[in-house]
Image (cartoon, helix red, strand yellow):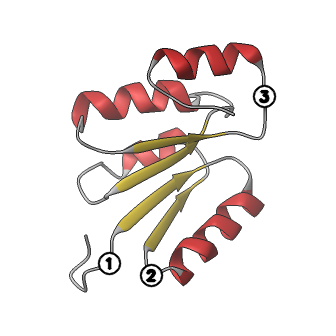
């Protein structure tokens, strides 16, 4: 949480339009949004100063599942939301295996 009481939500996605839209939406709801276009750039900044992570499942390089696993070793208490524009059965199976929910 920031010094002014706003929760910090970090978004990691390789789609710049989604990053901008989601950040605008979260900021309009009173959150501080921080955006990163890859897992690598996000991880370089550290994990201490955030309250929620939203990450795309299907990114090049480190995908959302891998990023979630890395984050959970350092911050097991941090909520991680996995999002995607894809609906492949393999991804749904992987998400369900870790307690994810898909409709």
Helix, strand or loop status at disc 1: loop
Which residue corresponds to the image point at 23% horizontal and 34% vertical from the top-left?
Answer: 74
Q: Position of residue 18 (x, y in %)?
A: 72, 59
Q: Are marks 2 and 3 in contact (CB under 8 Å)?
A: no
What residue would you read off at disc 3?
A: 87
Measured Cα–Cα span from mark 1 to mark 2 = 7 Å
Query: How far from the left and from the top, in percent, is residue 99?
Result: 45, 24
Residue 6: give its label: 1
User: What is the spatial separation of the Cα atoms under label 3 and label 1, in whole angstroms?
Assistant: 33 Å
Q: Quadrant of the C terminus?
A: top right
* Residue 60 to residue 13: above or below: above
Determine which of the numbered discs, if any, sits on residue 53 in the image: none
Numbered disc in front, either 3 or 1: 3
When the figure is inspected, residue 17 is found, relative to residue 79, above or below; the finding is: below
Side (left or right) of 37 relative to 79:
right
User: What residue is pinned by disc 2?
Assistant: 30
Q: Earlier in the sequence, mark 3 or mark 1?
A: 1
Task: Kindly indicate whether the residue at mark 2 contacts the one at mark 1 (C-beta within 8 angstroms).
Answer: yes
Q: In the figure, 47 relative to 25: above or below?
A: above
As drawn, 59 above or below 65? below
From this viewpoint, which residue is outermost toward the front? Answer: 103
Instruction: State the residue lying farthest toward the bottom.
Output: 4
- Considering the numbered disc 2 on the image, is that residue within a helix, a strand or a loop? loop
Work out whether residue 11 or residue 99 is closer to the camera in this orientation and state it. 99
In contact (CB < 8 Å): disc 3 and disc 1:
no
**Dot 3 surroundings within 10 Å: few (below 14), some, or many (20 or more)?**
few
At a point 56% along the width and 83% down the height, the residue shown is 28
Q: Position of residue 64 (x, y in %)?
A: 55, 32
SS category of the residue bearing label 3: loop
54 with respect to 4 (left or right): right
Tell me what residue is drawn at x 31 percent, y 58 percent.
51
């Amino acid at each position: 949480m920031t010094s002014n009481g706003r929760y910090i939500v970090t978004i990691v996605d390789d789609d710049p339009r989604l990053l901008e839209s989601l950040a605008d939406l979260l900021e309009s709801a009173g959150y501080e949004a921080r955006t990163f276009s890859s897992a690598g750039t996000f991880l370089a900044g550290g994990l201490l100063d955030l309250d929620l992570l939203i990450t795309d499942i299907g990114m090049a390089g480190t995908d959302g599942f891998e990023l979630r696993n890395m984050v959970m070793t350092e911050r097991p208490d941090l909520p991680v939301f996995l999002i995607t524009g894809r609906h492949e059965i393999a991804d749904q199976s992987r998400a369900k295996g870790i307690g994810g929910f898909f409709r």
